[in-house]
Image (spheres, rainbow, N blue to C red):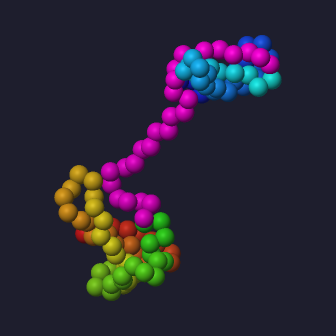
Amino acid sequence: MSALKFCGQCNNMLYPQEDKEMRTLHYACSACEHKEVATDTCVYKRVLRKSAGEPTDVLKDAATDPTLPRTRSVRCYNCGYPEAAYFQAPTKGEQGLTLYFICCSPTCGHRWRD
């Protein structure tokens, strides 16, 4: 799949267009009458890559989230701050839930799992 296609006559971008009668895909120029049959029927492809590790999208603002439980029974390994927010989440490749901790220090934000 090529990223962009351009008109061979006027160099404007070609846009995908469906021919409903023939049930085919064409690329058509919006400036002139040029059309060409699409060799690949894939118009757009989005590849999602997600790591199998920590749920980082959840951890962004977790230390400032007032709804998460907090504990003073653990200390941050990074800065020694005596308070951490925590939650449980499944970890890919492992059975059960993993306990995640986030340092509540405004300057640290270190995270670790138990």
Closer-to-camera residue (21/12): 21
Quadrant assignment for the C terminus: bottom left
Instruction: Say above or below: 76 vs 10.
Output: below
Q: In the drawing, does residue 19 fall left or right of residue 31? A: left
Residue 61 visible, this orientation: yes
Taking the spot 74% from the left edge, 22% from the top edge, the residue there is: 29
Check residue 57 for magenta coloring.
yes
Closer-to-camera residue (16/61): 16
Residue 78 visible, this orientation: no
Q: In the drawing, does residue 107 fall left or right of residue 21? A: left
Instruction: Say above or below: 56 vs 61.
Output: above
Q: Quadrant of residue 2?
A: top right
Check residue 8 for magenta coloring.
no
Counting from the top left corner in percent of width and height, residue 103 is at 40, 75
Taking the spot 54% from the left edge, 21% from the top edge, the residue there is: 23
Tell me how many marks there are. 0
Q: In the drawing, does residue 36 fall left or right of residue 23? A: right
Counting from the top left corner in percent of width and height, residue 48 is at 44, 43
Task: Residue lying at the far left in this picture: please name it.
Answer: 95
Q: Quadrant of residue 88?
A: bottom left
Instruction: Say above or below: 72 vs 28.
Output: below
Taking the spot 46% from the left edge, 77% from the top edge, the residue there is: 65
Task: Residue lying at the far front in this picture: please name it.
Answer: 21
Counting from the top left corner in percent of width and height, residue 66 is at 46, 82
Magenta part, dominant SS = loop
Counting from the top left corner in percent of width and height, residue 105 is at 46, 79
The part of the chain drawn in magenta is: 32-58
